[in-house]
Amino acid sequence: MHSGRITTLTGILLPLVLASTASCQQKTNAPLPDIRQLMSEVQAHQKQLEQVRENYTYSSLQTTQDVDQNGTVTKTESEEGEDFFVNGHVIERRVKKNGRPLEVHDEQKETERVTKLVEKAQNTPPDQPLEGPMVSISHVLEIMDVRNPRRDQFHGRSTIVFDFIGRKDAKTHGIVEDASKKLQGTIWIDESDRQVAHMEVSFDDNFKVAGGLFASIQKGSHFRFDQSPVNDGLWLPTGAEATVQARILMVKKLRQHFVERDYDYKRFSVETQQAKDEKVTPHKP
């Protein structure tokens, strides 16, 4: 880069950095907000963004590794998808498996699946689950002990951070709330935008599904989730990671490491709009 251009950029960026630093210092001295009020604001901000998110699509790459008891990877599989929002619900359309486009037959089945899912999403309120059980973060916090609220910098932005752990004596309803009693973790809330920027969660005890007859998730299984402002202040997922150890049907042991990367955010294409209109055009590699 030419020296003149460096000088120009320095003259523009340095005042911004100093102003940002001063702003962060002011926030650091401000009192911490009430955590439950904070999470209420997070949900309110998320609802405000739901309509805007409907105009965006993004790509996702999911990699799953089977790991043996010695930590050696024995199998790796990947899936690539095109993700979009319908009525507040995320819908993923798989377009590649293990780096290769779907076969014609599999592509037709995926088109049928997505078309049905779009129709279901259009008739399912945003605050109700589209697939599987769902519970809000703020509701989970009702059965959690919240600890050690503090401020910290995350990706150069001021965040409110707090730890949480499930209360063993909490009254719960449903598998998600039951599992929440076994969780502990830390959550980072962007202070300016009131959005979840980062979350780390782990099981501090074994969790049995159907009394252990169906599955048992082992202590130490952990998860990570990230969001960032990607377009005009719009917050969208940017990645996730999980390491899960479980026993299935009391016989099969499962050890998997899962990584998801979300990228290439853009306003939806004609093809994605057709998907929302239940006229899904097959993906052309």
Image (spheres, rainbow, N blue to C red):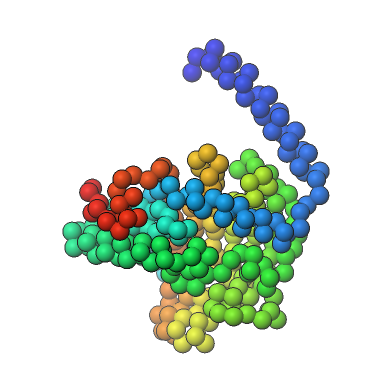
Q: In this view, does 134 lie to the left or right of 37?
A: left
| Residue 224 locus on image (x, y percent) | 54, 58
Give the vertical position of 222 relative to 5 (above or below).
Answer: below
How many circles with numbers are drawn on the protein? 0
Q: Is residue 194 visible?
A: yes
Q: Is residue 90 left or right of residue 233?
A: left
Outermost residue on the top side: it is: 4
Q: Nearer the viewer, residue 244 or 12?
A: 12
| Residue 251 locus on image (x, y percent) | 41, 84
Q: Which of 257 and 228 is in front in this view?
A: 228
Residue 37 appears in which quarter of the rendering?
A: bottom right
Residue displayed at 64% across by 65% down = 138
Give the vertical position of 11 relative to 38 (above or below).
Answer: above
Outermost residue on the left side: it is: 104
Residue displayed at 54% across by 48% down = 235
Give the vertical position of 204 relative to 250 (above or below).
Answer: above
Residue displayed at 76% across by 42% down = 27
| Residue 96 locus on image (x, y percent) | 29, 55
Residue 68 appears in which quarter of the rendering?
A: bottom left
Q: Is residue 177 left or right of residue 243?
A: right
Residue 249 appears in which quarter of the rendering?
A: bottom left
Residue displayed at 30% across by 62% down = 115
Q: Nearer the viewer, residue 163 or 23?
A: 23
Q: Is residue 98 visible?
A: no
